[in-house]
Image (cartoon, rainbow, N blue to C red):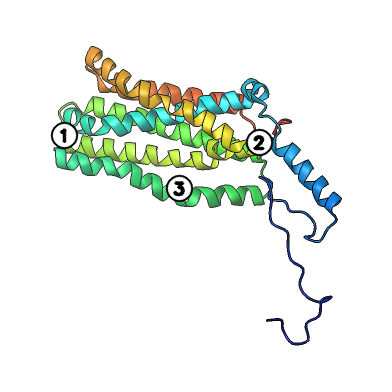
């Protein structure tokens, strides 16, 4: 029941239900019918506005972001599929140890991901430009793994005798390198929202579709190259290294974190 002493005037006003994707509501439940109708009409017009596909597909930062997403995922999918075979066939690691070693990069990735976000937030709070934060984070996420992959290739190449020290060094280098890919969480994975808060989900769906192609192309291509060359460094590492560095260059040149006019 009503509280003692409560009156019609001082009772809390009932809020109107939230309507539409924008999360707005009419000013008052008791507003005039014309006021509420006008507001709902404006919201409906905004909601029914067609997706600007032409502007999205022709936007240079979106294209750059899609390519970066492709490059970023190449190493992830290829190594996820081929690392166990690489450890057993190239490094001479037992199957049991190969399974354990394969867990090292994802675990390190999770550990680094825990402080990447706070680092980016601190940089923004200190006044660093958003575009600079995104480009810095994504450069680390791409150039870091590429550099450590190159080092792992050299260690593996010079350790053809299958020595345990060479194997452990290779695993350590790959783990360190792939852990840095977590910086993409403050780079490309935030960039969709930067470019267009309204269509961020569409942009992510678009670039993520392109980012899934390495799983379809990269994994069998690595197997084909391995069959032709019988060289793990050329088949697995070199394509990933080239794509990582090219992705970093593309994002540095054409990437942007400014809200687009259509966004």
Given residues 250 and 164, the one toward you in this image is 250
Q: Residues within 10 Å of mark 1 (few under 14, many from 20)?
A: few
- Is label 3 in a helix, a strand or a loop? helix
Residue 204 locus on image (x, y percent): 54, 34
Residue hosting label 1: 163
Relative to 227, 46 lies left or right: right
In the picture, which quadrant includes the N terminus?
bottom right
- Is label 2 in a helix, a strand or a loop? loop
User: Looking at the image, is mark 1 or mark 3 nearer the viewer?
Assistant: 3
Residue 231 locus on image (x, y percent): 24, 19
Residue hosting label 2: 196
Relative to 176, 160 lies left or right: left
Residue 85 locus on image (x, y percent): 21, 30
- Distance from disc 1 to disc 3, alpha carbons, whole Å, reads 32 Å
Q: Which comes before the other along the chain, label 1 or label 3?
A: 3
Q: Which comes before the other along the chain, label 2 or label 1?
A: 1
């Amino acid at each position: 029941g009503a509280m003692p002493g409560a009156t019609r005037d001082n009772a809390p006003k009932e809020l109107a239900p939230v309507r539409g994707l924008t999360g707005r509501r009419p000013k008052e439940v008791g507003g005039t019918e014309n006021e509420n109708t006008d507001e709902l009409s404006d919201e409906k017009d905004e909601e029914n506005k067609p997706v600007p596909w032409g502007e999205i597909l022709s936007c240079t930062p979106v294209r750059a972001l899609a390519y970066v997403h492709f490059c970023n995922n190449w190493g992830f999918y290829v190594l996820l599929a081929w690392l166990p075979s690489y450890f057993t066939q190239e490094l001479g690691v037992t199957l049991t140890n190969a399974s354990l070693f394969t867990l090292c990069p994802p675990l390190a990735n999770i550990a680094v991901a825990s402080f990447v976000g706070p680092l980016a937030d601190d940089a923004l709070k200190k006044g660093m430009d958003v575009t600079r934060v995104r480009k810095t984070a994504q450069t680390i996420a791409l150039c870091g793994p590429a550099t450590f992959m190159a080092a792992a290739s050299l260690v593996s190449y010079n350790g053809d005798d299958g020595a345990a020290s060479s194997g452990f060094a290779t695993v350590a280098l790959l783990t360190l390198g792939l852990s840095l890919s977590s910086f993409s969480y403050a780079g490309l994975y935030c960039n969709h929202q930067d470019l267009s808060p309204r269509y961020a989900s569409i942009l992510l769906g678009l670039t993520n579709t392109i980012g899934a192609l390495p799983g379809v192309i990269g994994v069998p291509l690595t197997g084909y190259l391995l069959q032709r060359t019988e060289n793990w460094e050329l088949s697995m590492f070199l394509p990933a290294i080239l794509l990582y560095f090219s992705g970093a260059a593309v994002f540095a040149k054409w990437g942007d974190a400014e809200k687009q006019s259509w966004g």
